Amino acid sequence: MSSHKIILKSPGEVAKLKKAGEVAARILMDLGAEIQPGRTTREIDQIAAELFRREGCKNAFFGYRGYPGQICISVNEEVVHGIGGDRRIENGDVVSLDVGTIVDGWVGDNAMTVPVGMVDPEVLKLLAATEESLFRAIDCARPGVPLADVCAAVEAFVRPRHFSVVRDFVGHGVGRSMHEEPQVPNYRPTWKTPRLKPGMVIAIEPMVNLGRPSVRILNDGWTVITADGKPSAHFEHTIAITDGAPLILTERPRIALLEQLGITL
């Protein structure tokens, strides 16, 4: 993949992306607090609409290629792109939330997977490993580093723990558009990748399965599920490459540290 398609952002543009990212992170965390047994995913989607109104920002997802939801809300075996509907959240579920904002024409994009009540310890380990793999990849994202090394960091962390990386969906560049170059897979890509440069802005988003990596899309044309029906986890940050350490544009508290979940990996 050639780097000439990648749109580098000025410091002023990165500041605008950070503003959009901060709003996206705030909505995501507020939604996470609303995840409770008995609520339907449609109710959560409706709460998301209220939060977008509160923030006075545009929604990057609603209407994107015809997408009908305010957010993506994916439960258990649903990997990504789940649409709010009649599914009722139950004790023991894990719920992935993906929020995209547009603030002054710039996109913020982030995601996390929330445990509900008493969750199977193996599934909690999946959440912890997925969130940690995101931060391992972020830590690699320094100027001059091949993008492939950032991608490889995700799989290098989760695979020894016997989890599998979804290969059909990937992270991406972010700017005025939600999906820009480059693609950011969660495994070492076979194609040539650019070296990171200051001003590059990318969304890194590990999608990791408890079972096999295979997925399929439901008849609604959007919802991606694991082919084996086992749970999946999804964590995402949008980051900017700087002259030194990467800048997390969607900064928010971590939710799946081992001590938070009461487990050990």
Image (cartoon, rainbow, N blue to C red):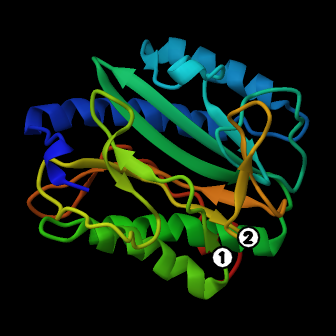
Left or right: 19 in relation to 188: left
Left or right: 49 in relation to 4: right
Q: How many marks?
A: 2
Left or right: 91 in relation to 162: right
Question: Which quarter of the figure is the C terminus placed in?
Answer: bottom right
Residue pictured at 52% horizontal, 31% vertical: 27
Image quadrant in which you'd find residue 126? bottom right
Image quadrant in which you'd find residue 56? top left
Q: Which residue is mark 1?
A: 163
Distance from disc 2 to disc 1, alpha carbons, whole Å, reads 5 Å
Residue pictured at 44% horizontal, 48% vertical: 252
User: What kind of residue is marked 1?
Assistant: Phe
For residue 264, above or below residue 40: below
Q: Which residue is mark 2?
A: 210
Whether residue 139 is visible to the viewer of this picture, yes or no, is no
Residue pictured at 64% horizontal, 52% vertical: 113
